Image: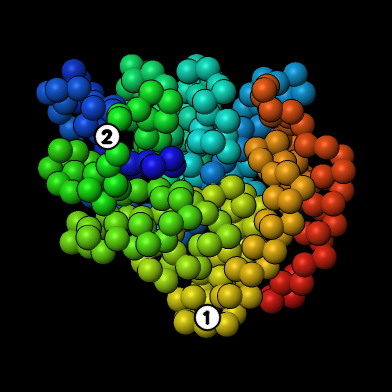
C-alpha cells in the first residue's frame, strides 16, 4: 500500500559490523542490534517541507527557525523528514543525509522524535540511508513500500504485520496513508497484542481514524495547522466530540477548497511560507511553483475561517 512505513524505536544503535534492519529492506543477514527503552510516539508528526533557495538548492540554515516555529507556534514536537512532502525522492542521497543531520542537530532538546524516511527505488541506497540515520542519532527510520518495481503478489497490510516482530525486532509501527478506514481498523484490531503504533496519513479524516484506534498522525498540514489539530485531539480526549468535529470539519473545508484549486507539494510550500513567514522556496523540478492566484485564494480562505478557539 502506498504510504506504508516502518518506524524504528528511539534509542536504536547499530553495532560495529552490523546493519540497521527491517527485513529485506534496510538490513542484511547477521545484523546485530541493541535497543534502549523507546518513547511512545503519540499525537502529531509534521511531514516536513524541504526549504530551498531560489535556484533550487536545499536551504539548511532555515531548519533552525523551522524547528522553533513548529514547537512554539504549532505545538508539534515530532517530524517526518525526507518524505513525499519533503520531496525526498527528488533529492540526492547526499542532500537527504544533510537534511537528516540538520534536523537531528537542530531538534536536539526541542523535538521528541525525528523520523527519517529512508525509502528509495534502490535498495542499497535505502540501506545506506538507514545506516546513516542510525549513526547521526535519529529516533526512527521509515521506508515507503516498493512502488515502481514491486512484488506481483498482493499482500494486505494486516497480513504483512503478522509475526513481523520476530523478523524485525525493532519494528515499531505503521504510517497508514490510505482512505480505507476498514483496512486500518483490521490492522489495529488484529495486532492489538503487539502494541504497534498506527499513525494516520490523511489529515482531513484524522478524527475518524482516532475513533478506531489510531495513535496519532503524520501529515503536511500539521506544519501550519498543528495547533488547531492539537486542539482537536484534546477535545477528542475529553471527550468533547462536538468540538472535535468542528475542528475537523474546518480543516476539511480548507483542504477541500485548495484541492479543487490544485494542491500538492508546491502549494504546501506556498501556504507554509505565508503562514509561518519562513521562506520555503520553490519545489524541485519537475514540480513548479504555486501560482499567484492559488496563493491569493488559499490565503483568503484560511484567513476567513473562524476557529472554535476564536483565533
Question: What percent of the width, then of the height, locates residue 20?
Answer: 25, 28
Question: What percent of the width, then of the height, locates residue 291?
Answer: 83, 37
Q: Which residue is mark 2?
A: 153
Quarter of the image where the C terminus is located? bottom right
Instruction: For marks 1 and 2, give the CA distance.
Output: 41 Å
Residue plotted at (46% across, 50% down) = 178
Q: Is 50 on the left or on the right of 156, as rendered?
A: right
Q: Is 285 on the left or on the right of 186, as rendered?
A: right
**Coloring basis for residues:** rainbow
Q: Is 24 on the left or on the right of 87, as rendered?
A: left
Q: Residue 27: which numbered mark, if any?
A: none
Q: Earlier in the sequence, mark 1 or mark 2?
A: 2
Residue plotted at (70% across, 36% down) = 266
The reply to whether residue 64 is in sight is no
Query: Compared with residue 10, is residue 144 higher up or lower down, i.e. above or below?
Result: above
Secondary structure under tag 2 reads: loop
Q: Which residue is mark 1?
A: 241
Question: What percent of the width, then of the height, locates residue 108?
Answer: 47, 41
Amino acid at each position: 500500500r502506498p504510504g506504508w512505513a516502518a518506524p524504528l524505536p528511539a534509542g536504536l544503535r547499530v553495532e560495529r559490523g552490523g546493519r540497521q534492519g527491517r527485513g529485506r529492506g534496510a538490513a542484511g543477514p547477521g545484523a546485530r542490534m541493541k535497543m534502549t527503552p523507546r518513547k511512545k510516539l503519540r499525537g502529531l508528526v509534521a511531514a516536513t517541507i524541504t526549504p530551498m533557495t531560489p535556484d533550487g538548492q536545499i536551504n539548511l540554515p532555515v531548519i533552525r527557525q523551522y524547528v522553533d516555529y513548529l514547537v512554539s507556534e504549532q505545538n508539534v514536537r515530532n517530524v517526518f523528514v525526507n518524505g513525499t512532502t519533503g520531496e525526498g525522492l527528488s533529492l540526492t542521497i547526499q542532500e537527504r543525509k544533510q537534511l537528516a543531520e540538520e534536523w537531528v542537530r537542530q531538534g536536539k532538546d526541542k523535538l521528541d522524535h525525528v523520523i527519517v524516511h529512508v525509502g528509495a527505488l534502490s535498495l542499497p541506497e535505502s540501506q545506506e540511508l538507514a545506516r546513516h540515520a542510525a549513526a547521526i542519532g535519529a529516533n526512527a527510520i521509515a521506508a515507503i513500500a516498493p512502488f515502481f518495481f514491486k512484488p506481483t503478489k498482493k499482500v494486505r497490510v494486516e497480513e504483512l504485520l503478522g509475526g513481523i516482530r520476530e523478523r524485525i525486532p525493532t519494528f515499531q509501527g505503521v504510517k497508514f496513508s490510505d482512505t480505507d478506514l476498514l483496512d486500518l481498523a483490521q490492522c489495529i484490531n488484529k495486532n492489538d497484542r503487539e502494541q504497534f503504533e498506527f499513525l494516520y496519513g490523511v489529515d482531513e479524516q484524522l478524527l475518524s481514524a482516532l475513533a478506531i484506534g489510531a495513535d496519532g498522525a503524520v501529515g503536511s498540514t500539521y506544519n501550519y495547522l498543528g495547533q488547531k489539530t492539537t486542539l482537536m485531539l484534546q477535545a477528542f480526549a475529553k471527550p468533547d466530540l462536538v468540538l472535535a468535529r468542528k475542528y475537523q470539519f474546518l480543516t476539511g473545508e480548507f483542504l477541500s477548497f485548495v484541492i479543487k484549486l490544485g494542491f500538492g507539494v508546491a502549494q504546501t510550500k506556498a501556504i507554509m511560507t505565508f503562514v509561518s513567514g519562513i521562506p520555503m522556496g520553490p519545489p524541485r523540478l519537475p514540480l513548479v511553483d504555486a501560482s499567484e492566484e492559488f496563493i491569493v485564494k488559499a490565503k483568503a480562505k484560511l484567513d476567513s475561517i473562524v476557529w472554535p478557539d476564536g483565533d
